[in-house]
DNA sequence: CTGTTAGCGCGTTCAG
DNA sequence: CTGAACGCGCTAACAG
């Protein structure tokens, strides 16, 4: 039913090979023939069959994007960026959302099913088991991790230890000592470096400042608004609540912020909060945060794949690792502890 | 390089035809042969080539999802839902993000490029030109619109007029008369019914209540946080500002809320605000809103496509239109105007 | 510069 | 119940 290359060939009075060459801009085609073929293809509405092309060339012109979520800020941003870059270069994007849950209780992800469908894969901080990673490697496809890194595979991410340190140092410099940390899932996946590193940064900064860390101040928030809320509730219930909180993600910070206010705890008068991301709504909340360039990470990841897909690309170079800069954005959710200044509404909200 | 059906056939000592039948559960294969083949396929790690299958059957087992954004709440939710449902049924999802901008200034979308790649298409309230729509129809593929509807094509959406009416009536019933409306883009696309309908609902409710509508109270917010903020600024600058605002989307409502508070206008004491969506963060903001079941819309849309893809499906039935229910969720951003009751902090934030 | 000939990997008749 | 043979639409040698 669809228009095939043969239809075009017949109509143009040439062979299918010539049509193929003409349409793809290959050399060895007279300008006249090329123009003629192009015209006919156009008004016949000819579109090459992807499957046939793939079968013949072995390349799918499709990149798989594996992600655990699409609705969360980081992932949505990253997907949008990756898709844009890829589509611009003529690649299709196959979206693969891994069912939620840790790698233990979700259905196993079988990278093999990607084998015949994509030329490369971008993995957005998905917690994968060692088995899955091995299978992924066995595909021998260009693979890039975004927001995390795995030995031997390309990656684009930020220095999450620096993130934790930056946030914590900001609070320390304001005079805080009792600084809590709301992180991801303590029983979560192993191959998910961001939360672990951010915590490490927090600990490192605390230690460097000679501050003892109370284990009670290290609570899980699961990277969700609601999780952040619960975490904050837990912290406020302590005999000696923190004067400052470092939340490993803005969404958790929002929850924490809301919970604090609801509990009548004034931010930043009685409690300072720092997040990570610089979410679209962080400014609205007046949230101090460590900004990470998510879209940039997406773009860079796509670029790495594209480059690895180039015919000239040697398939066995050392995997590239791109580390992007982060930056502390100070807003109104942080201040020095126990200031005796008038507690006016310093927050916009 | 990949394992082909022939490798399996050779190893099993049968023909490729038998392998094909055995693996796909077709009849006319002895139980023994079937088991044998299955085992060998498994330990050879055989995965049928999608392209080859497609070429042979004419079906791609892929559904295209066309969306203008992935990072905005509605779209992210819908994409996640559609993807989940589709993948569960063995379909791949090809993500196609249409560059931002109205259909006038973005690069034209050529549905033809989908022809050889997908079996069906889900369009998420993307503003399409008539030309694009026609081209889409010409594909003669099952097509479903989510969040909007187009004559002759399937759709899943909510009654946006009812949405506008519901929100407005809530405000009217509280005693408001000067009710503003923050909508989408006045110069925006035509085939994008949601904003138009929501406004119509607002007007209709106002008229039904015998309230005159001041054109100055109808301002654009572009469905973004920042747009909502600007809109609110504009409204507050009026000689006679509104006592209530109906924002056509929660993200705009957030912006409006923040702007109002920043301007020192107490919500809901001096100003009531209603949104639409019931965004994940609406509860945090205490935002009264008209909830719409986005994920459900995504699931239903996927189901419609799946059903139309069934071999038994007659290709020329009338297009199905699914209309889902909405519901007003009253929170703390709305109250009666000019109440003289103590203005305590009634909002959590 | 162009046409011919082979496949790419699978599904699908049609014979056995 | 099973196999041989052909075709899906296109690209890639290889001739001319």
Image: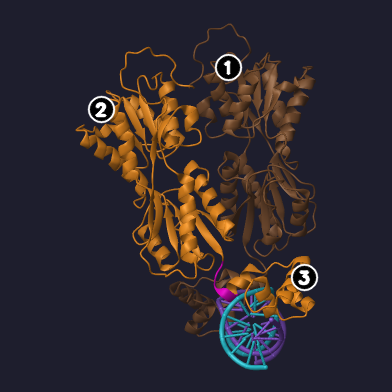
Chain colours: A orange, B brown, C purple, D cyan
Q: CA distance from mark 3 to mark 2?
A: 74 Å
* Viewer-side residue, B23 vs A338: A338
* Viewer-side residue, B111 vs A240: B111
> Are the residues flagged by discs 1 and 3 in contact, CB closer than 8 Å?
no
**At numbered mark 2, what does the secondary structure look like: helix, strand or loop?**
loop
Q: Is residue B94 visible?
A: yes
Label 1 lies in what chain? B
Residue that mark 3 sits on: A40
Q: Is residue A240 magenta?
A: no
Q: Is residue A98 visible?
A: no
Q: Which residues are magenta?
A: A56-60
Which residue is located at x 68 percent, y 74 percent?
A22
Residue that mark 1 sits on: B268
- Relative to D16, say whether B318 is above or below: above
Q: CA distance from mark 1 to mark 3?
A: 65 Å
Which is nearer the N-term, disc 3 or disc 2? Answer: 3
x, y percent for residue B142: 72, 56
Label 2 lies in what chain? A
- Relative to A98, say whether B6 is above or below: below
Q: Which is more foreground, mark 1 or mark 3?
A: 3
Q: Which is more foreground, mark 3 or mark 2?
A: 3
Residue A14 found in image quarter = bottom right
x, y percent for residue B245: 65, 22
Main structural element of the magenta stretch: helix, strand or loop? loop
Question: Image check: A169 left or right of A348?
Answer: left
Residue that mark 2 sits on: A177
Which residue is located at x 78 percent, y 25 percent?
B204
Label 3 lies in what chain? A
Labels 1 and 3 within one chain: no
């Amino acid at each position: 039913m669809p228009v095939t290359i043969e239809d075009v060939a017949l109509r143009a009075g040439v062979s299918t090979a010539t049509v193929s060459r003409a349409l793809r801009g290959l050399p060895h085609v007279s300008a006249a023939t090329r123009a003629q073929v192009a015209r006919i293809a156009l008004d016949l509405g000819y579109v090459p069959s992807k499957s046939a092309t793939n079968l013949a060339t072995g390349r799918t012109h499709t990149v798989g994007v594996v992600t655990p979520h699409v609705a969360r800020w980081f992932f949505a941003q990253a997907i949008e960026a990756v898709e844009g870059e890829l589509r611009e270069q003529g690649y299709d994007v196959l979206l693969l959302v891994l069912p939620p849950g840790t790698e233990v209780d979700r259905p196993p992800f079988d990278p093999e099913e990607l084998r015949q469908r994509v030329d490369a894969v971008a993995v957005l901080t998905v917690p994968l088991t060692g088995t899955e990673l091995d299978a992924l490697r066995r595909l021998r496809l260009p693979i890039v991790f975004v927001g995390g890194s795995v030995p031997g595979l390309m990656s684009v991410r930020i220095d999450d230890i620096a993130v934790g340190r930056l946030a914590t140092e900001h609070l320390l410099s304001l005079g805080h000592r009792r600084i809590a940390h709301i992180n991801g899932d303590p029983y979560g996946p192993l191959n998910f470096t961001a939360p672990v590193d951010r915590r490490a940064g927090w600990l490192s900064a605390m230690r460097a400042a000679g501050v003892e860390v109370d284990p009670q101040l290290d609570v899980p928030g699961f990277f969700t608004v609601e999780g952040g809320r619960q975490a904050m509730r837990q912290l406020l219930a302590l005999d000696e609540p923190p004067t400052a909180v470092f939340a490993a993600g803005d969404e958790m910070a929002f929850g924490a912020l809301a919970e604090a206010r609801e509990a009548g705890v004034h931010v930043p008068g009685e409690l300072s909060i720092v997040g990570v991301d610089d979410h679209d709504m962080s400014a609205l909340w007046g949230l101090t945060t460590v900004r990470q360039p998510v879209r940039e990470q997406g773009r860079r990841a796509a670029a790495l794949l594209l480059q690895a897909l180039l015919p000239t690309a040697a398939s066995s170079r050392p995997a590239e690792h791109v580390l992007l800069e982060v930056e502390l954005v100070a807003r109104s959710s942080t201040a020095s502890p126990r200031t005796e200044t008038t507690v006016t509404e310093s927050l916009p909200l």
